Image (spheres, grey):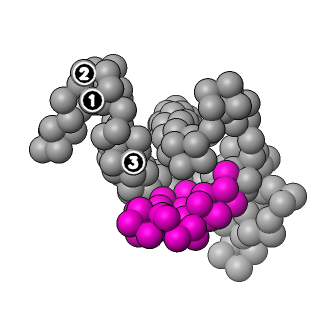
Amino acid sequence: MDDETLVLLGRIAVGWGQITFELDHILFKLLGASVEAFKEYPTVSLKRKLGDLDRELSKPERAKQRPLLLKVHKAVGDLASDRNVIFHGLWGICLNSSLGEWTTISRSYTRETPFALKDLSAFHERLIAAAEIIDAAFYNLVLVEMCPRFGIDVNFGLMARHPREIPLHRL
């Protein structure tokens, strides 16, 4: 892989970290977990987190939040399989006999379809779109309630953010 590809993989890894950080905090708020009980939650599998989110969004008391939570669930769920094969699969070169050319792919024992390196930029774009959805949920479900407790004024036109936050952006 060339340097440009490795940089893109790094951007995807950082972006996924941002997504899971915000997803964890959304779930922390929805589940009403104590800080002590939540310490181990970031190590829980994504499948379990999506299951927890699914149970929460189906509760009657979540009716107002349901549209946003459904978008979060879909955004993360749509990325999960590709993300897993990108980072947990084995990268190599494969001969595409129908095209008669060599292709760089990542394969995983957990899914039949490999991930082609040529699709990495498109995955990055999907990741950014998902991050925007999850970011909106994080700010609306978590920070809007937390900011006043810490004396921070949330301006919805500017969205109060941590000054060191690095938002994802398109290439």
Quickly name the residue at label 3: 141
Kind of residue at badge 1: Pro
CB-based contact (under 8 Å), mark 1 and mark 3: no
Any part of residue 5 in sight: no
Q: CA distance from mark 2 to mark 1?
A: 5 Å
Kind of residue at badge 3: Leu
Q: Nearer the viewer, mark 1 or mark 3?
A: 1
Whether residue 30 appears in magenta in the rendering, the answer is no
In this view, the residue in front, 80 or 97, is 80
In this view, the residue in front, 162 or 14, is 162
Q: Residue at x 12, y 44 (%)?
A: 157
Q: Residue at x 15, y 38 (%)?
A: 155
Number of dots carrying numbers: 3
The image's mark for residue 159 is: none
Q: Categorize mark 3 by other alpha carbons within 10 Å: few (<14), some (14-19), many (20+).
A: some
Q: Which residues are magenta?
A: 49-77
Q: Of helix, strand and loop, which one carries label 2?
A: loop
Q: Earlier in the sequence, mark 1 or mark 3?
A: 3
> Quarter-wise, where is residue 148 in the image?
top left
Q: In the rendered view, would you say 99 is above or below 35?
A: below
Quickly name the residue at label 2: 151
In the image, is 55 to the left or to the right of 14? right
> Quarter-wise, where is residue 20 in the image?
top right
In this view, the residue in front, 29 or 160, is 29
Q: Of helix, strand and loop, which one carries label 3?
A: helix
In the image, is 82 to the left or to the right of 17? right
Q: CA distance from mark 1 to mark 3?
A: 13 Å
Which SS does the magenta portion mostly show?
helix
Any part of residue 136 in sight: yes
Quickly name the residue at label 1: 148
Q: In the rendered view, would you say 158 is above or below 52?
A: above
Say which quadrant the N terminus sits in: top right
